[in-house]
Image: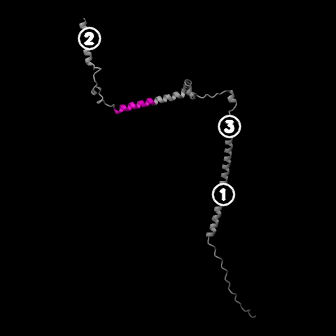
């Protein structure tokens, strides 16, 4: 039985290994098909590029939306995991009854600045009104001066009237008194 088994085993092994390449067999470039390999078409490459770009864009949009929704929680987790990254923790403003009752110095300063700005605005409006009134007065003065100038030019350019000639007198003829 051992001879039958070994004979079957040897036939099987030779048939099996004959179809498959040996591991120790040297590779030939023709076997690898590196030289005759074809590039994918332009449409296929473009499609792949666009799909990669679309996936990258969508991952970025998802990350942005996630950060906006869960950004504070994420910062807290990162800050609690490492003390060096504590600056990432969101700064929580303490709002209590005392904070609302007493305005902070910044709010008082803002109020005083806003009142100051209101006064400055009023003063600027007054100055603008004065300038407008001054401009109107100046326009009237200029018009009056132009009218006077025109009158002077008219008098200069008009011909002077000729002096009236004195009437010529005829000497009176003396007649002798008639005898009576």
Left or right, 42 with respect to 6, comes to right
Q: Position of residue 172 (x, y in %)?
A: 70, 87
- Element under label 3? helix
The residue indicated by pointer 1 is: 140
Q: Of tags 3 and 2, which is closer to the observer?
A: 2
Earlier along the polypeptide chain: callout 1 or callout 3? 3
The reply to whether the magenta stretch includes residue 162 is no
Q: Position of residue 37 (x, y in %)?
A: 30, 29
The residue indicated by pointer 3 is: 109
Q: Is residue 15 above or below residue 167?
A: above
Q: What segment is highlighted magenta in the picture? A: 41-56
Quadrant where the image shows the N terminus: top left
Classified by dominant secondary structure, the portion drawn in magenta counts as helix
Q: Is residue 173 above or below residue 136?
A: below
The residue indicated by pointer 2 is: 9
Residue, far top: 1
Residue 34: image quadrant is top left
Earlier along the polypeptide chain: callout 2 or callout 1? 2
């Amino acid at each position: 039985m051992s001879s039958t088994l070994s004979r079957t085993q040897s036939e099987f092994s030779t048939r099996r290994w004959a179809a498959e390449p040996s591991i120790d067999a040297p590779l030939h470039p023709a076997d690898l098909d590196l030289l005759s390999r074809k590039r994918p078409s332009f449409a296929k490459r473009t499609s792949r590029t666009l799909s990669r770009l679309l996936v990258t864009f969508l991952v970025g949009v998802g990350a942005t939306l996630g950060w906006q929704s869960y950004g504070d929680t994420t910062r807290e987790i990162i800050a609690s995991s490492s003390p060096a990254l504590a600056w990432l923790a969101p700064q929580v403003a303490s709002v209590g009854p005392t904070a609302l009752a007493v305005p902070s110095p910044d709010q008082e300063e803002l109020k005083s600045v806003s009142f100051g700005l209101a006064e400055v605005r009023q003063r600027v409006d007054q100055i603008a009104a004065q300038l407008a009134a001054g401009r109107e007065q100046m326009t009237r003065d200029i018009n009056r001066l132009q009218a006077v100038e025109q009158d002077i030019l008219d008098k200069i350019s008009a011909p002077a009237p000729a002096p009236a000639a004195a009437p010529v007198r005829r000497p009176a003829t003396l007649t002798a008194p008639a005898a009576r």
